[in-house]
Amino acid sequence: MSDFARYSRQIVLREVGVNGQQLLRDSSVLIVGVGGLGAPAALYLAGAGLGRLILTDRDRVEPSNLQRQIVYRGSDVGRSKLDAAAEALRALNAECEIETLPGPLDEAGMGAAVRNADLVLDCSDNFPTRVMLNAICVAARKPLVSGAAIRFEGQLALFDSARGSACYACLYPDTGETQETCEEAGVLGPSVGVVGSLQALLAIKRLLGLGDDAGRLHLWDALRMSWRTLNIPRDPNCPVCGARPGAAHG
Ligand SMILES: [Zn+2]
């Protein structure tokens, strides 16, 4: 390891240590969407010494992003989010390899990106992307950390179908409803930052094999400052994971 001091605060944790740090260095994480969730998640993962971050996004930086998308500066307005985020992340940690995939990715492109990663963060802002990403992650047996935040509510879950947990479609069947957006409904920056930060935490824990977070839905209420955690039952009739008995496919 080239820089022990940089990671000393986490290496000193018995549960991480030098071996855990090397595990992170050997790991790749795909972050789909570098917005309010993906920005803090990417910063924390680059800071933690992930070996490679793969980012995909379709947007340019807009003034209204700066309230919560903390990887961007005012001077980035008008730039591609991928270019601006990659520059900031490299400036934070040159040891972290940053790969950028301009979106929107089609199913084949997203599939290739998922297969190149050890773990996926869904930081997207739309239901069709969430549905597609979940199906790809189930098929590729990759852990998926899903996050969302709107108004004063946030939610967070690790879906790990390779280990028999429920998938995103077990929780949210595709009912064809359109989802609200933060543009219409609003959100506070720190509230979405809490969820994005915890997506990075769940990713690090899963990569290091710490705890068992799969299959639980964490609901954040920013007005009450409280969390609720629910078990997500696996739906035996789920069109995405239901027809695939747990241990099949290798
Ligand atoms: Zn399912």
Image (cartoon, rainbow, N blue to C red):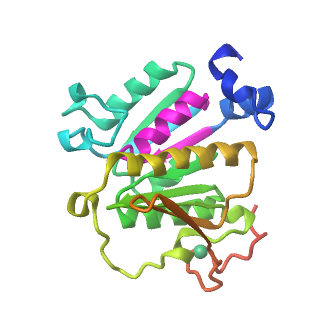
Q: In this picture, which residue range is highlighted in magenta?
A: 28-51
**Image check: 35 left or right of 138?**
left
Q: Residue furthest bottom?
A: 237
- Nearer-the-camera pick, 55 or 111: 55
> Which quadrant is home to the N terminus?
top right
**Image check: 71 left or right of 97?**
left
Asked whether the viewer can see residue 48, the reply is yes
**Does residue 158 sit above or below 247 in this rendering?**
above
Q: Give the residue displayed 20% in from the left and 40% down from the top.
A: 62
Q: Give the residue displayed 55% in from the left and 44% down from the top.
A: 200
Ligand 1 is located in which of the four quadrants? Answer: bottom right
Q: Give the residue displayed 66% in from the left and 59% down from the top.
A: 141
**Image check: 215 left or right of 228?**
right
- Nearer-the-camera pick, 189 or 232: 189
Asked whether the viewer can see residue 218, the reply is no
Q: Position of residue 18 (x, y in %)?
A: 78, 26
Q: Position of residue 22 (x, y in %)?
A: 73, 28
Q: Is 190 contained in the magenta span?
A: no
